[in-house]
């Protein structure tokens, strides 16, 4: 477990240092400039999907889906990060009470 | 590791029962954008030697946004170091508080805490969706990840999505 955490940490740091240190031309290739910003978009969206609709390896539809709808609303209203997260958690908690 | 999306992703994969290595790859892929930020910042910061080693740890979404928003290079440098220092301290104190608080919370589900990570990922994602193409990619990525999820080990849906978006980006 900790080996994975340490190696991921080293990789994340190395990417930052590489950006500051490598010659400008290496990273400014049009293809890299195009692909790299798309990767977080795809991964974050995939995380939203999988963390909402699954438990382990099973697809489930529960109160987290309702919480996601509320957080989409909060995001559309340009609510700050903590408000979005708190609104989702409160929705799930309240729906579990009823 | 000081880059929020990567930290959340690693914890998310491991918490979902996935291998730490799948989580590590997802974290590193999410961290790749920091290399482009570093590229933007290197001419602004002009950091050499030990200062560069320290500056690198502070290269994240927030410090980049604060630094490139300033016209005056000396203000840019100040914005970078001030944002980086403040965030680094508060972020890690917050992480520590969270780690200590887990012992106090018997069942996180009662507080809806299992709904918090998707909302956090959504809030990180939203500012990147200001155009039609990233919006389409996000919807497709979420669908693909959910559809493949029952058939592959936990964490692997993220790697499949990363591969697909890289192929898409490179081929058109």
Image (cartoon, rainbow, N blue to C red):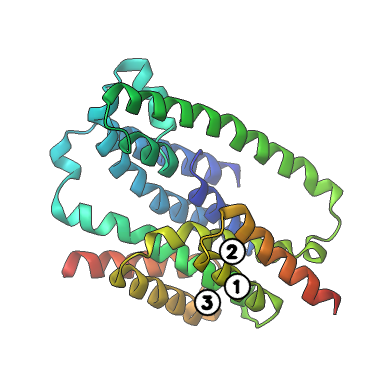
B77 with respect to A29 (left or right): right
Q: Nearer the viewer, residue B108 or A71?
A: A71
Chain letter of the residue carrying label 2 = B
Q: Which mark is residue B149?
A: 3
Instruction: Kindly tell me whether residue A57 is visible in this rendering.
Output: no
For the residues bearing labels 3 and 1, Cβ distance under 8 angstroms:
no
Label 1 residue SS: helix
Q: Is residue B130 above or below residue B142?
A: above
Chain letter of the residue carrying label 1 = A
The residue that label 2 is drawn on is: B119
Point out residue A11 in the picture as x, y percentages from the top left corner.
41, 41
The residue that label 1 is drawn on is: A68
Q: Nearer the viewer, residue A76 or A59?
A: A76
**Which residue shows up at 86% across the image and 48% down it?**
B104
Q: Nearer the viewer, residue B97 or B154?
A: B97
Label 3 residue SS: helix
**Which residue shows up at 33% across the image and 68% down it?**
B134
Point out residue A41 in the picture as x, y percentages from the top left corner.
39, 62
Q: Is residue A21 above or below residue B115?
A: above
Counting residues from the N terminus, which is met first, the one under dot 3 or under dot 2? 2
Work out how far the residue at label 1 is from the one at label 2, CA to CA, in angstroms: 6 Å
Instruction: Kindly tell me whether residue B144 is visible in this rendering.
Output: yes
Q: Residues within 10 Å of mark 1 (few under 14, many from 20)?
A: many
Work out how far the residue at label 3 is from the one at label 2, CA to CA, in angstroms: 19 Å
Q: Nearer the viewer, residue A11 or B30?
A: B30
């Amino acid at each position: 477990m900790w080996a994975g955490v340490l190696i991921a940490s080293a990789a994340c740091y190395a990417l930052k240092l590489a950006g500051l240190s490598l010659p400008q031309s290496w990273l400014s290739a049009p293809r890299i400039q195009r692909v790299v910003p798309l990767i977080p978009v795809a991964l974050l969206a995939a995380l939203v999907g999988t963390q909402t609709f699954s438990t382990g390896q099973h697809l489930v539809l529960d109160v987290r889906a309702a919480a996601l709808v509320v957080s989409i609303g909060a995001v559309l209203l340009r609510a700050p990060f903590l408000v979005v997260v708190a609104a989702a958690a409160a929705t799930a908690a309240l729906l579990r009470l009823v | 590791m000081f880059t929020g999306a990567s930290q959340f992703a690693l914890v998310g994969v491991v918490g979902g029962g996935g291998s730490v290595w799948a989580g590590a790859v997802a974290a590193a892929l999410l961290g790749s954008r920091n290399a482009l930020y570093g590229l933007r910042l290197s001419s602004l910061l002009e950091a050499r030697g030990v200062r560069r080693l320290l500056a690198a740890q502070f290269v994240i979404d927030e410090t980049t946004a604060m630094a490139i928003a300033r016209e005056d290079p000396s203000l840019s440098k100040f914005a970078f170091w001030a944002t980086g220092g403040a965030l680094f301290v508060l972020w890690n104190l917050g992480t520590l508080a969270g780690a200590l608080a887990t012992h106090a919370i018997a069942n996180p589900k009662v507080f809806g805490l299992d709904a918090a990570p998707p909302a956090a990922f959504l809030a990180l994602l939203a500012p990147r969706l200001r155009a039609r193409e990233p919006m389409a990619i996000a919807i497709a990525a979420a669908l693909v990840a959910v559809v493949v999820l029952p058939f592959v080990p936990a964490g692997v849906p993220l790697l499949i999505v990363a591969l697909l978006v890289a192929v898409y980006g490179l081929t058109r």
